[in-house]
Amino acid sequence: MIFSRRSFIGAALAGATMLAGTAALAQDTIKVGVLHSLSGTMAISETTLKDVMLMLIEEQNAKGGILGKKLEAVVVDPASNWPLFAEKARELITRNKVAATFGCWTSVSRKSVLPVFEELNSILFYPVQYEGEESSKNVFYTGAAPNQQAIPAVDYLMETEGVKRWVLAGTDYVYPRTTNKILEAYLKAKGVKPEDIMINYTPFGHSDWQTIVSDIKKFGSAGQKTAVVSTINGDANVPFYKELGNQGVKAKDIPVVAFSVGEEELAGVDTKPLVGHLAAWNYFQSVDTPENKAFIEKWKAFTKNPKRVTNDPMEAHVIGFQMWVKAVEKAGTTDSEAVIDAMVGITVPNLTGGYSAMMPNHHITKPVLIGEIQGDGQFSVVWQTPGLVAGDEWSDHLEGSKELIADWRKPMSCGNFNVKTGKCGGRSS
Amino acid sequence: MPLARLLGLLALAALTLAAPARAQGTDVAPILARFALDRFPDTQAAIEALAASGHPTAQPVLEALNEGRLFVRTGDRAIVWRDASGPLRLAVSGEAVADAPTRPVRVSNAIRRSLELALGNLSLLAPDPARRLEAARALFRTRQAASLPLLRTALERERDLRVKRAFLEAQAAIVVTATDAPELDRIAAATVLADRGDREAQGVLRAAAVGAPERLAAEIDTSVRAIETRLSLLAMAQNLVYGLSLGSVLLLAAVGLAITFGVMGVINMAHGEMVMIGAYTTFVVQEAIRLHAPHLFDASLLIALPLAFLVAGTVGMAIERSVIRLLYGRPLETLLATWGVSLILQQAVRTIFGPSNREVGNPSFMSGSLDVLGLTLTWNRLWIIGFALAVFLALLFTLRFTSFGLRMRAVVQNRRMAASMGIRTHWLDALTFGLGSGIAGVAGVALSQIDNVSPNLGQSYIIDSFMVVVFGGVGSLWGTLVAALTLGTANKLLEPYAGAVLGKILVLVFIILFIQKRPRGLFALKGRAVES
């Protein structure tokens, strides 16, 4: 083929425009979706997470963004309305072309957006402790799985407090029900008799706890040490703890260990009658490390409110965001497929003085801390796991789940591989 | 086991009490230094050693630790403590020192239990009877056999009858669970506990029954059963009280709606938000009091009541004038419009106060509980029962005996006739709506004491309120009272058997069936006004 001069010039011109095009693209931004409810019931918890995402993105931009581009947050409000979560997720991915999304709080909202992220092959970072029994190629679970929160908490009560009788109290929806199922199986395997376990569910926003607290007192007076494992969610905790305090249930007699009560939830309560009750998390604001101190200062400066508290799901977003930034830099692109492959094995410092790594099952390693509520609404850490605990998506204590594993590395790429039959069960959950 | 060792040491401490001169000689400085290590096992060991030392500083230091007033000075890691208000004091000598940066000595539940035990032993001979009573209760809970000699000494000296009884019960609790005590002593102890007859006594007896010899086991069995019968009767009474309490909360939430919906016929979906506005008014009042006049805190609710009435009432009147006035006689449009108003109000509050819960404190007279014959009645619930009835009576009085009430009833019965008698019916509509909203605001003040003050507060009550008004009979105040108490009691009687979720469903099904049978509710209004 002979190049004519004209066509050469044409090609050169085309090349120049292309170069100009990439230069223009460099001015462009990488979009990050923030999918948290800013109105409705869940606004109380999720608004904070939106703020922390904005802070992280601002901070990354001050460092020069990623791959030479600035980040831009796209904030939408799914209004605590589960089907709306799916619509907003689709809008973020198809219309706004976000590179990754950070969002959801309740399990039901995650289940609602899951098919959207899988269909459009986009990335979701989910920052809240949850019931497990799920692993999706497109979701990175930066909150705790049951073995990173519930099981160590029960172990602590058994060993340190000598608890023999158990009240499993929860709100009536998927997370408490699954967690309690796992705990019940675990306790029975440890030799706890069925009559020493009391299970109780209450509706969302339950406010009249008189009967249940007096039942707990009754159950706890059988002459053996009793503890309450609480998966009570959200608002209902405040009247629950008030009633405990008023009816004189003291932590040194019947301790309550909660999985959904953090610094943010205690902000609306006078905690003096609750001193000594426990919570299990992977992070507490009171953890004394330089990383955490710096983070709290930045947070208070960003929100311009010296009283703002930090909590566990916020740390999960901090870890998730740092991991995503590293993965994008490693992959050299924001393309979902490349980033998902790059994610596994990424390790970033967490705020409790250690490192968290992304495991092949898309869950991360975390330390487990048990904290006691203090008079000032903070927690004092009384126990922690000696090392990091890797998130176990399929519980080892449930039938039909113990033989499953997830490994998203190629060539396996499976969220529910059955080690007995040697077959992959299909899509995510 | 550290506890057993501690108790051995405590027995020693009892002996050394007799010889304080020798005890003074113990050097506590190395013991105190262990508190500074910030490790729970060391803190525990320090408590044990300190209690055993018999040193005069032991008691104030342990009490300070128990109440979170024991600190480590940051610079030299000296252990210091302070009274509720006084200066810092060195733990070694009790000498007052200048203020310095400190961090508290941390405690856990296990440490709190050791403290309870150590302090219980230290204060068995305290001059203050209240402290001796507390010590006796602590011993009853911990039941450590090693405390027995000290307890016997204390019993001989005791003159106060109440404390003496508590000492006897503690002694019985220890003896009945001691497997090495003579069986006859244990049986006698079991009868003492049977007389006490509460949950705690039952718990001790059950623990004692494990591996007990035959006669004792039989004795314990009958005692446990007698206590069980007594307690199940009590539980019935308790459920009734709980039902009354839930009923009074429902009454408070619904009584305002009984005016706007029941009397005026306006389906007001924003009613719950009036309750929320009342609760937020309480929050604002408390914040102002905290800032400017902290000594008035216990009166904060009293101050908030009229303000909440005015604020919610004004908002209510504004809604009536601007929205509802234009929609009279069109119930569906009213429903949708007020639903919209409720969303606007919620989001407005969310924007102004933020989405998180706001802390509304309980005044001291509404905290804690009252024990009546073994029933635990919490003060906040008792006050709310009384308050709900007071609001109800005040409303009844207003409608029955004031000229405003007379005009209101006249407009409801026959609007045109009332208008032709010179009543400004439009103005009266606004006032009536304001009254209903104001009462919802007052309910908000009370509900702020038992529920979350958040933008969603109103939503959780709106459905219950409509249920009460419809069940009681639209337009009948007495119906609202009876319906609220019935639903509350039914709910609480069902809850222990069916659980909270199923209990609520059963009540709802019952109401649906009832409305099928009597569409006008419990207390149906009769007469021509209703037919039209």
Image: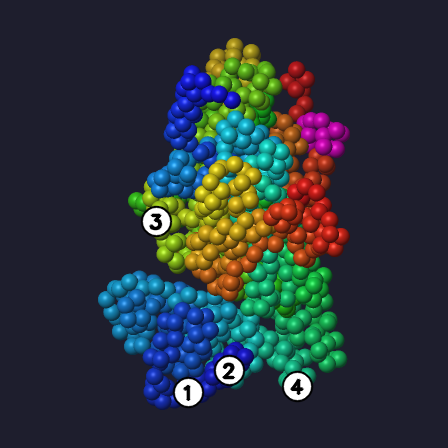
Q: Hey, what amino acid is under mark 4?
A: Pro
Q: Which circle, 4 or 2, is nearer the viewer?
A: 2
Q: Residue furthest top?
A: B420
Mark 4 / mark 2, whichever is N-terminal = 2
- Report the residue marked by disc 1: B16
- Report the residue marked by disc 3: A297
- Report the residue marked by disc 2: B5
Q: Residue furthest left?
A: B98
Residue B48 seen by the camera: yes
* Magenta residues, start to end: B512-524
**In the figure, is residue B412 to the left or right of A72?**
right
Mark 4 / mark 1, whichever is N-terminal = 1
**In the foreground, A3 or A127:** A3
Q: Kindly report the distance in space between the C-alpha atoms of the residues bearing marks 2 and 1.
A: 16 Å
Q: Which mark is residue A134?
A: none
Asked whether the beta carbons under mark 2 and mark 1 sit within 8 Å of each other, the answer is: no
**In the figure, is residue A363 to the left or right of B292?**
right
Q: Which circle, 2 or 1, is nearer the viewer?
A: 2
Task: State the residue at coordinates (57%, 48%).
Answer: A362
Q: Kindly report the distance in space between the C-alpha atoms of the residues bearing marks 3 and 1.
A: 52 Å
Assess whether residue B287 is covered by the magenta stretch.
Answer: no
Same chain for marks 3 and 2? Answer: no
Dot 4: what SS?
Answer: loop
- Report the residue marked by disc 4: B182
Q: Kindly report the distance in space between the C-alpha atoms of the residues bearing marks 4 and 2.
A: 24 Å
**In the foreground, B290 or A408:** A408
Asked whether the beta carbons under mark 3 and mark 1 sit within 8 Å of each other, the answer is: no
Q: Which circle, 3 or 1, is nearer the viewer?
A: 3
